[in-house]
Image (tube, rainbow, N blue to C red):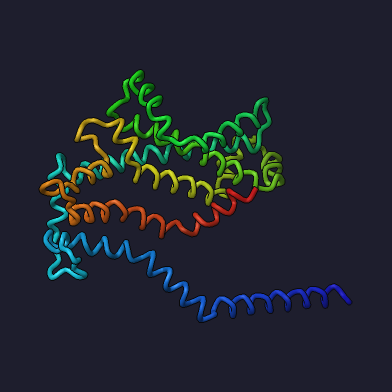
Amino acid sequence: MTTQALHARQARGIRRSRIQAQDHSRNPIRIIVAIVLAALFAFPIVWTTIGAFKSPTEANASPPVWWPSTLTLENFAKLDGTGSSLLVYVLNSVAVTTMTVLITTVAAVLAGYALARYRFRGQNAFFGVTIGMLLVPYPALLVSLFTVMVWFGLTNSLFGLALIYSTFQMPFAIYMMRNSFESVPDELIEAAELDGCTKFSALPRVILPLVAPGVVTVALFAFLAAWNEFLAALVLLNDNPSFTLPIALVNAQNGPLNTIDWGALQAGITVTMLPCVILFILLQRYYVSGLVAGTGK
């Protein structure tokens, strides 16, 4: 059999396997199961969003009102009556999250590149200790971290809170970036060095664009963790104007006679989850490929 005939046979086999995979994915049972699962996952989001626009009476009604008689923003207005305005809480969360993402991403990229491309004494021990930190529950470290923040005068500080969030995210971020850099062929770095680049200067010019999905994954994980984190903010912050959005939601949910104001709570959850949903939809392509590249070794 000639080489051309062999290639043609392989091409026909690949096309046949693709057609079979497409037919298999179009199985009606699979489609029905996928629709049911998608509806189950989407129901809490849709229900919370609808509840945010109900009147307080309908939002707290039992049995529940499935659809509001009139759409109102009264529940969102209640979020402004919890001390500071809703805009202040959102800006605080945006500031903390932005600093967390920048610190985590920059440090993880540099550390991951050093672990993947440089050889130094204690390298494996350092990486092992970093991965071992994933096994430690972060609430167990809050007392020690709070003491450190007191020493540096960073209590009730958004920057100090961002440092704590970055500390919690760093082990996983370094692990992801190290594996992402190791997936880059050595030949590319050698070619960059032949063109006059050093190992470090090749990072922004050649390698970083190749591991962009891993960088996006690390940044997205840091964003989601910092945006939704509650316990560390509750421990470190003690001034209402410095509260982040999750802390404000706890204050907003308290109704009369110590009941839960479901309308205000659902409005706050809607505001909180909106940036997460938008970012995930926009970056899901990079997120999936980044997870594959970051956990492939």
Q: How many marks?
A: 0
**Is residue 49 rendered to the left or right of residue 108?**
left
* Residue name at image x 25 percent, y 45 percent: 90
Q: Residue 172: percent from the left, percent from the top?
A: 52, 41
**Is residue 262 rendered to the left or right of residue 215?**
left
Name the foreground residue: 151 vs 90: 151
Name the foreground residue: 36 vs 123: 36
Up the image or down, 243 lies above or below 22; here it is: above
Q: Residue 34: percent from the left, percent from the top?
A: 46, 72
Up the image or down, 290 lies above or below 88; here it is: below
Name the foreground residue: 275 vs 146: 146
Q: Residue 71: percent from the left, percent from the top?
A: 15, 66
> Picture quarter containing residue 5?
bottom right
**Is residue 100 rendered to the left or right of residue 86?**
right
> Picture quarter containing residue 13?
bottom right
Q: Residue furthest top?
A: 151
Name the foreground residue: 134 vs 272: 134
Q: Residue 186: percent from the left, percent from the top?
A: 70, 44
Q: Quadrant of the N terminus?
A: bottom right
**Is residue 98 rendered to the left or right of residue 210?**
left
* Residue name at image x 29 percent, y 65 percent: 46
